[in-house]
Image: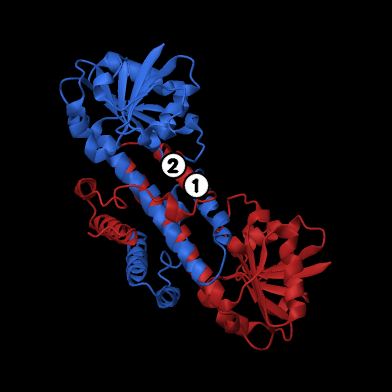
Chain colours: A red, B blue
Amino acid sequence: MIDVVILGTGNVAVHLCKAIQSSETITVKQVYGRTKRSLISIPTEIDTTTSLSDLKKSHIYIIAISDDAIKEFSKQLPIRNCLVVHTSGCVPINDLDNKNRKGVFYPLQTFSKERQLDYKTIPICLEAEHNEDLDLLKEIGLEFSDHVEIIDSQKRATLHLAAVFVNNFVNHLYTIGYDLLEQESLSFDLLKPLINETANKINSIPPIEAQTGPAIRNDQKTIQNHLHLLNNNSDKDLYRMLSTIISKFYGKEL
Amino acid sequence: MIDVVILGTGNVAVHLCKAIQSSETITVKQVYGRTKRSLISIPTEIDTTTSLSDLKKSHIYIIAISDDAIKEFSKQLPIRNCLVVHTSGCVPINDLDNKNRKGVFYPLQTFSKERQLDYKTIPICLEAEHNEDLDLLKEIGLEFSDHVEIIDSQKRATLHLAAVFVNNFVNHLYTIGYDLLEQESLSFDLLKPLINETANKINSIPPIEAQTGPAIRNDQKTIQNHLHLLNNNSDKDLYRMLSTIISKFYGKEL
């Protein structure tokens, strides 16, 4: 049995607990949270602590806290020569403190506590200093995903950047669509089939071939009508910039 | 039996033919295309013509051509007092010529010739001058979709604008993600589960609540690292603008 201690209580930590609970070869030995309150999302059958000095011995310690806190937190850990990994897309492996063996276990997915996820489809991006540690990470990764990849910190940074474009930025475009419809008392449900098809399409066609709409045709009449309809200046600026970028990308001069 | 004549041979025209072919109450009586070559995507069992003077008598004429050509084309039609509708999201109903009864049959979806679509889920947005024409449009709409809505030209323009944000602009963000990964020899497959989950999530959570990432936290360290990784100036500008808009939208000052 592989023992895992999870340090953190956010969305990734909670999903890690859930994913590992269904495993027969890995067990969550303990979860650390800063406060008792922060631990309420952790399944009750898992042992928890709010004190780093009470950390149990484990094969691996997984830091699942916010990116900007990882470096300092890893210094505070009262353990030595253990395998300590983080789950961040954008934090280099070497931000982890030298007193432990370093690694990364980055599940490339967007996590909300309330969403049920199919863990088998989530790519797990791994990195470690030592081969034996990488083997252990692979074993854990393959336990709940079919897609385990070894990816170094530099490539992982690019992957995370790309994820910001296709997840964070895309989601904000959904929000703009939602707000536009709300202003006209139209239901967001009208856009859902289009949103789904847009995402599904790129499973069979590269996105560069799936592009349609006024910007790729440099259809200035429609573009100007749309700008006229937008009453929020930042949405106008964004519409203008994206249309210009798309027109130029496909070789239509503006 | 309701007779339909389709004027045009693009993606929407081809999908309309396919959708109507499976109907027992509607039939495609004829498809008009400017050239014989343009008609090759039309199923061979459907009657076609390249001459407007050969148009058959029909209950409805559906113009499915590019948005900016609809107005002029409707003037050229050698028919009178017939129901003529277009399929565009952004062209007002009154752009159609006065000599015929006007209407709109706008399927809110992105169409590629090669994609199989589940027509039942596609919202069909209808508009007509006369109630009897609206009834006919509803009958046709309900024949292949479960979602038929009456939406006037003004609301439809906003819907189309929102569709540009959640489809055209989103797809270009997928292209940026694709290119970033290609530069690092990483497979785009790595991003597909994230893209799918991002789209699926908004079925259960409004997008405003699904937002995550460095911009909503105004995490300047990650934002600066990402800007440093981007070597294309337009991608940098876009990243900067979207991050600023998201940070401000969620009340984080920059």
Residue A201: mark? 1
View extreme (left): residue: B98
Chain designation of label 1: A
SS for tag 1? helix
SS for tag 2? loop
Residue depicted at x 46% and y 26%: B44
Q: Quadrant of the C terminus of chain A?
A: bottom left
Check contact, mark 2 vs mark 1: CB within 8 A.
Answer: yes
Quadrant of res A252: bottom left
Q: CA distance from mark 2 to mark 1?
A: 9 Å
Q: Which residue is mark 2?
A: B112
On the image, the x and y values in percent for residue A151 come to 62, 73
Q: Is residue A173 visible?
A: yes
On the image, the x and y values in percent for residue A201 come to 50, 47
Q: Residues within 10 Å of mark 2 (few under 14, many from 20)?
A: some
| Left/right of residue B172 with respect to residue A71 in the rendered view | left
Q: What residue type is disc 2 on?
A: Ser
Q: What residue type is disc 1 on?
A: Lys
View extreme (right): residue: A1
